[in-house]
Image: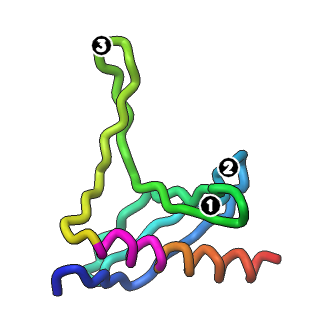
Amino acid sequence: MKGRIMFESCDVRIVEFGSLVALASVTLHNGMQVRGFKIINAGNGEHRVSMPSREVMRDGCMESYPLIRFECPNAKGEFEKLVLAAYERERSLSE
């Protein structure tokens, strides 16, 4: 099912450190767990999902390389909506 995001669960941990508001791990339908998602406060009550990445030093400059790539343009948006919904649920439980 190309473009359709299927995951079993999304574990969210509220951290609230500067603009970082939470960390998330996603367990896919095949049992693989992907960690390192960050939920960022983008201002005006908006939040966005930062995908896991690796920072490396190259020619004296830090460069960031994504660890996850979505092949279908709609898949990333759908994925972010699902992660943000899990964040909202967790946030409402912690209040």
Sequence-earlier tag: 1 or 3: 1
* C-alpha span from label 1 to label 2: 9 Å
Q: Position of residue 49 (x, y in %)?
A: 50, 61
Q: Residues within 10 Å of mark 3 (few under 14, many from 20)?
A: few
Magenta region, main secondary structure: helix
Numbered mark located on residue 59 in the image: 3
Q: Quadrant of the N terminus?
A: bottom left
Q: Quadrant of residue 72?
A: bottom left
Q: Amino acid at mark 3?
A: Asp
How many numbered callouts? 3
Nearest the camera: 68 or 78?
78
Q: Does the magenta segment cover residue 22?
A: no
Nearest the camera: 72 or 95?
72
Q: Position of residue 86 (x, y in %)?
A: 56, 79
Q: Quadrant of the C terminus?
A: bottom right
Residue at the front extreme of this rendering: 44
Secondary structure type for disc 2: loop
Q: Amino acid at mark 1?
A: Ala
Sequence-earlier tag: 2 or 3: 2
Q: Which residue is mark 1?
A: 22
Q: Which residue is mark 2?
A: 19
Q: Does the magenta segment cover residue 80?
A: yes
Q: Tell me the mark number nearer the camera, choosing from 1 and 3.
A: 3
> Which residues are drawn in magenta?
74-81
* C-alpha span from label 2 to label 3: 29 Å
x 23%, y 80%: residue = 3
Q: Compared with residue 44, is residue 57 higher up or lower down, i.e. above or below?
A: above
Residue at the right extreme of this rendering: 95
x 31%, y 47%: residue = 66
Q: Amino acid at mark 2?
A: Ser
